Structure formats: C-alpha cells, structure tokens
Amino acid sequence: QVQLVESGGGSVQSGGSLRLSCAASGIIFSRVTMGWYRQAPGKQRELVATAGWDGFTNYADSAKGRFTISRDNVKNTVYLQMNSLKPEDTAVYYCNAKGRTDYWGQGTQVTVSS
C-alpha cells in the first residue's frame, strides 16, 4: 500500500520561507518521479516541481528561482524548500509519486499573508 505523508505547511508572511516534506512508503522510491503540486481555492491543481529518479528537476515558471525540490533516496523523502513566498502561493500542496499510476498525499495547507 502506497502512502505519501506531507508535513511542513503553515502560515507565513509574504517574503517568508517554508520547507515541505513528503515521506513515502510502499513504493520503490528511487525508481519513481516525485513531485509537488498545489491547488488554490477555485483553481485546478497545478504542477510546482518534480524530481526524477535520475536527478532531473523541473519547475513551474512560478516556482523558478524561489523553490527548490530535492529528494533523499535513503529516507524515501522528497522536500520542497520555498523561499520568498507570495500571497499567490497560498494553496494546498500535494505530494505526488508517478509509479504505475499517480499516487497522492493528503495535502498540506500553505497560507501566505501580505
């Protein structure tokens, strides 16, 4: 059974930082692409960043230069370091694992106030 458990969300002021973590179990972590997505109220879920098993990373334009995705294949954990946060970053952030199918975490709320 695949489980993705996110942590690290919270409320910060504009310009602040947060670090999200996602601990994975039930998958061969080192062989899957891990990613972070977000969904703001009234909007569709969108890609934030992905980190491939080969180390390749990909970022949404909105995340480039501010967010950094990383993964620890020993701890089976993927991280998202978010700096220079803006109110428009407010959303529920979801961890994703791309195996035979897409697996999702339960989400963690990030709220950025101006």
Image: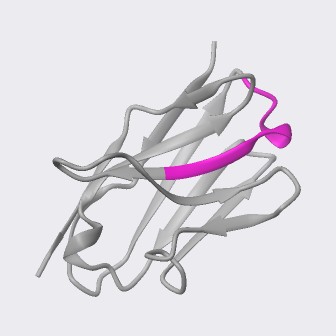
| Boundaries of the magenta span | 27-36
Q: Going by the image, does 56 lie left or right of 68?
A: right
Question: Looking at the picture, how far across and down is residue 81, in whole percent?
Answer: 51, 70
Question: Looking at the picture, how far across and down is residue 95, in whole percent?
Answer: 51, 43
Residue 30: say if magenta.
yes
Q: Is residue 82 above or below residue 25?
A: below
Query: In the rendered image, which quarter contains the C terminus?
Result: bottom left
Q: Is residue 96 above or below residue 41?
A: above
Residue under the point 74% across and 22% down: 100
Task: Return the residue found at the far top.
Answer: 1
Residue under the point 80% across and 48% down: 73
Residue under the point 37% across and 46% down: 45
Task: Return the residue found at the far left.
Answer: 114
Q: Going by the image, does 30 lie left or right of 78?
A: right
Task: In this rendered view, identify the residue nearer to me: 57 or 5.
Answer: 57
Question: Looking at the picture, how far across and down is residue 36, in whole percent?
Answer: 52, 52
Query: In the rendered image, which quarter contains the N terminus?
Result: top right
Residue under the point 80% across and 64% down: 56
Residue 10: say if magenta.
no
Task: In this rendered view, identify the residue nearer to me: 73 or 67.
Answer: 67
Which image quarter: residue 29? top right
